[in-house]
Amino acid sequence: HTRFRNVTGVQTCALPICGDAIRGDEIQRWLDMNGTPRKSFVILDDESDMGDLIPHLFLTHPLEGLTPQIADAVIGRLNTHLDEHDDA
């Protein structure tokens, strides 16, 4: 498996479902209230209603959770964004 590199912090958040709210809207509100991270963030969720945040989503299965394949894809995405930031 690959590993994170050059990571200064990993932030996790568990949001409650608020009524009929779209999950992506809830996450966007949280980002707005807590400071939107650089483009190098991912969303791990078993719901796909992410709206404009869909490019950040890694869809998990509600019974399987985070699989090694998804974890590797997430790490690859974050490392790619770190490489792009390093080149800037």
Image (cartoon, rainbow, N blue to C red):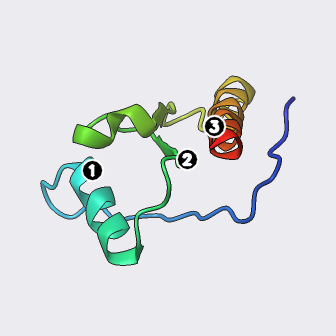
The answer to whether residue 50 of the structure is visible from this angle is: no
Category of crowding for the residue at label 3, using alpha-carbon neighbours closer than 10 angstroms: few (below 14), some (14–19), many (at least 20): few
Q: Which mark is residue 14?
A: none
Q: CA distance from mark 1 to mark 3?
A: 28 Å
Q: Say which residue appears at 51% left-offset and 33% top-offset.
A: 60
Could you tell me how far apart the alpha carbons at marks 2 and 1 are, in whole angstroms? Answer: 19 Å
Mark with earlier residue (1, 3): 1
In this view, the residue in front, 63 or 45, is 45
Q: Amino acid at mark 2?
A: Ser
Sequence-wise first label, 2 or 3: 2
The residue beneath circle 2 is: 40
Alpha-carbon distance for marks 2 and 3? 10 Å
Q: Residue furthest bottom?
A: 33
Res. 23 mark: 1
Numbered disc 1: secondary structure: helix
What numbered label is drawn on residue 84? 3
Q: Residue furthest toward the top?
A: 69
Q: Residue at x 21, y 64 (%)?
A: 18
Quadrant where the C terminus sits is: top right
| Other-residue count near label 2 (Cα within 10 Å), few / some / many at <14 / 14–19 / ≥20 | some
Q: Residues within 10 Å of mark 1 (few under 14, many from 20)?
A: many
Q: Is residue 70 above or below residue 32?
A: above
Q: Is residue 26 above or below residue 40?
A: below
Disc 2, SS? loop
Point out the image quarter for the N terminus. Answer: top right
* Residue at the spot 74% in from the left edge and 64% down from the top edge: 8
